[in-house]
Image (spheres, coloured by chain):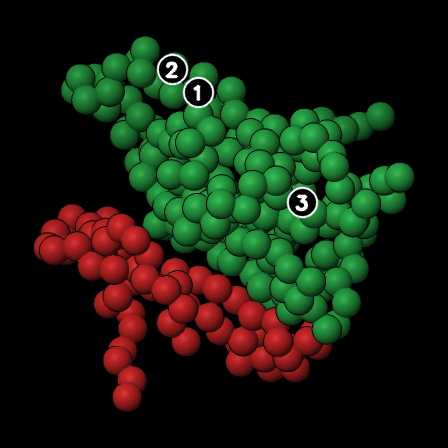
């Protein structure tokens, strides 16, 4: 689940690192993932979660 | 005693050679001057967790400042004269009775250096980086921090664009304390989230 858009748009590091110009800047999103979805048999509280920034090219629109 | 390192010296690997080449080429091509590297190292070394502690104490005392800090960590810290020398955003994560925040960089060692200084050794090492996102409660227990099951643990993994700072809970019994007295309670580990102030300082009157 996307919680927020990170304020400053950025170039795609993974493309730039290989010398491929990523062109226009895109957004990072702060995404919330329950730990029970990440790790089977997660022993802690089902409310525990991870927050991570994910670059726009790795996300798909749902709906 | 036998504590020195016996790791055999080996030829540098591909990425190490690339790093050395880059480090030598940048000054050679005039893109960075040696004095700029020296100055930046000096700035990095000048930062300590006391800066973050000042931010936390101010946020506890001044609710308008706290709101600005949670809205934009960077500009709020700049109000206190803390400068930022790089691009990442600073997101401040507020601990509440229901949520405990923990920060990690699973990729490397991203850390809110402008407000905390250099990260501790364990923060950069793989066991913490791997386990913080997988067994956070076990990791916290190893730091002597027990988070009740009805409190959500929220781990924030820094990658490229963001650094995080935890705003710890203000401990009970500190009403009327000055900003300096409050700041003295706030340690590095409470702003990473591996400790809580109440559990680490049982001696509060």
Q: Is residue B59 above or below residue B130?
A: above
**Chain letter for the part of the structure drawn in green:** B
Marked residue nearer the N-terminal end (2 or 3)? 2
Q: Residue at x 87, y 44 (%)?
A: B202
Does the CB distance between marks 2 and 3 fall below 8 Å? no
Does the CB distance between marks 1 and 2 fall below 8 Å? yes
Measured in 3D between alpha carbons, the distance from the residue under mark 2 to the one under mark 3, in whole angstroms, is 29 Å
The answer to whether dots 3 and 1 both sit on one chain is: yes
The reply, left or right, for residue B90 in relation to residue B144 is left
Chain letter behind tag 3: B
Q: Residue at x 51, y 20 (%)?
A: B46
Which residue is farthest bottom? Answer: A63
Percent x, y for residue B45? 51, 21
Measured in 3D between alpha carbons, the distance from the residue under mark 3 to the one under mark 1, in whole angstroms, is 23 Å
Q: Which residue is labeled 3 in the image?
A: B190
Q: Residues within 10 Å of mark 1 (few under 14, many from 20)?
A: few
The answer to whether dots 2 and 3 both sit on one chain is: yes
Q: Is residue A11 above or below residue B147?
A: above
Q: Which residue is labeled 1 in the image?
A: B43
């Amino acid at each position: 689940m996307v919680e927020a858009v990170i304020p400053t748009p950025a170039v795609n590091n993974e493309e730039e690192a290989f010398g491929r110009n990523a062109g226009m800047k895109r957004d990072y999103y702060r995404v919330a993932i329950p730990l029970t979805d990440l790790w089977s048999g997660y022993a802690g509280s089902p409310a525990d979660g991870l927050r991570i920034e994910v670059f726009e090219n790795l996300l798909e629109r749902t709906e | 005693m036998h504590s020195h390192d016996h790791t055999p010296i080996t030829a540098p690997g591909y990425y190490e050679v690339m790093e050395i080449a880059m480090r030598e080429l940048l000054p050679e091509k005039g893109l960075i001057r040696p004095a700029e590297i020296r100055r930046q190292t000096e700035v990095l070394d000048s930062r300590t967790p006391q800066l973050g502690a000042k931010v936390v104490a101010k946020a506890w005392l001044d609710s308008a400042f706290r709101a600005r800090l949670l809205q934009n960590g960077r500009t709020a810290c700049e109000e206190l004269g803390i400068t930022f020398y790089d691009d990442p955003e600073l997101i401040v994560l507020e601990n509440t009775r229901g949520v405990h925040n923990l920060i990690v960089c699973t990729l490397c060692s991203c850390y809110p250096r402008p407000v905390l200084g250099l990260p501790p050794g364990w923060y950069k090492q793989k066991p913490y980086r791997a386990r913080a996102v997988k067994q956070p409660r076990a990791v916290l227990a190893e730091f002597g921090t027990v988070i009740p099951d009805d409190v959500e643990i929220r781990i924030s993994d820094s990658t490229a664009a963001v650094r995080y700072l935890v705003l710890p809970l203000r401990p009970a019994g500190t009403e009327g304390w000055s900003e300096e007295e409050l700041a003295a309670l706030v340690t590095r580990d409470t702003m990473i989230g591996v400790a809580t102030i109440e559990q680490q300082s049982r001696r509060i009157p």
